[in-house]
Image (cartoon, rainbow, N blue to C red):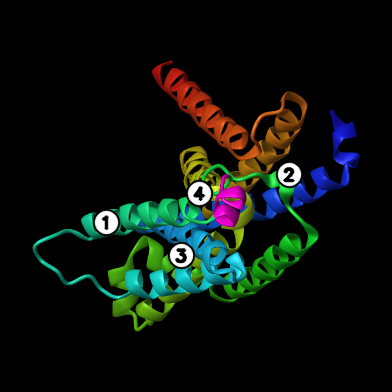
Amino acid sequence: MLEIFKEPFVQTALLGGLITACLCAYLGVFMILKRIVFVGIALSQVAALGVALGLFVGVNPVLSAFLLTLAGIILFWIPFTERNISREAFLGFIYVFCAATAIILIAKNPLAEARGLNLISGNLLYTSWPDIGILGIAFLFILALHLLLFKEFIFVSFDRETAFTTGLRTNVIDFLLYLSIGITISLSMKICGVVFVFASLIIPAMVGLISAKRTGMIFFIACASAAACVAIGISLSYMWDFPSGPTIVGLYSLFFILLIGIKTILGKE
């Protein structure tokens, strides 16, 4: 099995998948703690629309995805004040609108249709070194930001009201966290697709949260489980000619189900 990692395109796929999965798994813990999972799936679809729009008008799809996701970040960061509908309903509207528009743009443009077939499931085996470079820069930026403000992000995620009463600028911290999530989603959407990105935000984070109580271990288990599934998933997708993204998501899900089963059995003993 290790022989396949000597192939250059498998190496770029593995590196791109590891960077994306670990970033998403790490940020996904914050999303679950803050109960903003719907924001994650809505931003994923906004980024997908950005990719489709870029292909449709002939601009760099990474740039268009980033700009549209940045607009979505600002929109979701602003407090929702409409009393007659819930914030979740509004996020659902954004998701459906972006999904439908992306499908229309892909269907009406031959280039977008040819290159956009992997927009949902993604194909890590098409990852290029320029893609790795962009993801690497994003990784370093988010790493520096979270090393600087990790305690603040944790405080706001666990108890925003108490953090506010202590004088912490919770709106700014929230925006920086949303920005981290948005950058990761928008820059990884082109190579990974909606399914892989959203699954990487949610499932490894759930694995970490149900496996450990200490904060550091939660993040470590989330990232480690994501990385392991990416490595195994790319190997299986190469050997069995499966699409890489859904294969990895299937492994995420299988690992989570097995973990739940083991915890349930042990809890009854």
Ranked by sequence position, the earlier of labels 4 and 2 is 2
Residue 2 x %, y %: 87, 32
> Where residue 163 sits: x, y (%)?
35, 73
| Picture coordinates of residue 93, whole percent (x, y) | 26, 56
Q: Is residue 257 magenta?
A: no
Q: What residue type is labelled 4?
A: Val
Magenta-highlighted stretch: main secondary structure?
A: helix
The reply to whether discs 4 and 2 touch (Cβ–Cβ < 8 Å) is no
Residue span colored magenta = 110-117
> On the image, numbered disc 2 is attached to which residue?
125
- Badge 1, how many Cα within 10 Å: few under 14, some, many 20+? few
118, 197: nearer the viewer? 118
Residue 16: x %, y % from top left: 71, 53
Identify residue for label 3: 154
At horizontal 70% and vertical 67% (from top left) the residue drawn is: 134
Q: Nearer the viewer, residue 118 or 147?
A: 118
Residue 121 visible in image: yes
The answer to whether residue 68 is above or below residue 196 is below
Picture quadrant where residue 248 is located: top right
- Is label 2 in a helix, a strand or a loop? helix
CA distance separating discs 2 and 1: 32 Å
Secondary element under disc 4, as helix, strand or loop, is: helix
The amino acid type, in three-letter code, at marker 3 is Ile
In the rendered structure, the answer to whether residue 63 lies left or right of residue 79 reads right
Report the mark closest to the observer, 2 or 3: 2
| Alpha carbon distance from label 2 to label 3 | 35 Å
- State if disc 4 and disc 3 touch (CB < 8 Å): no
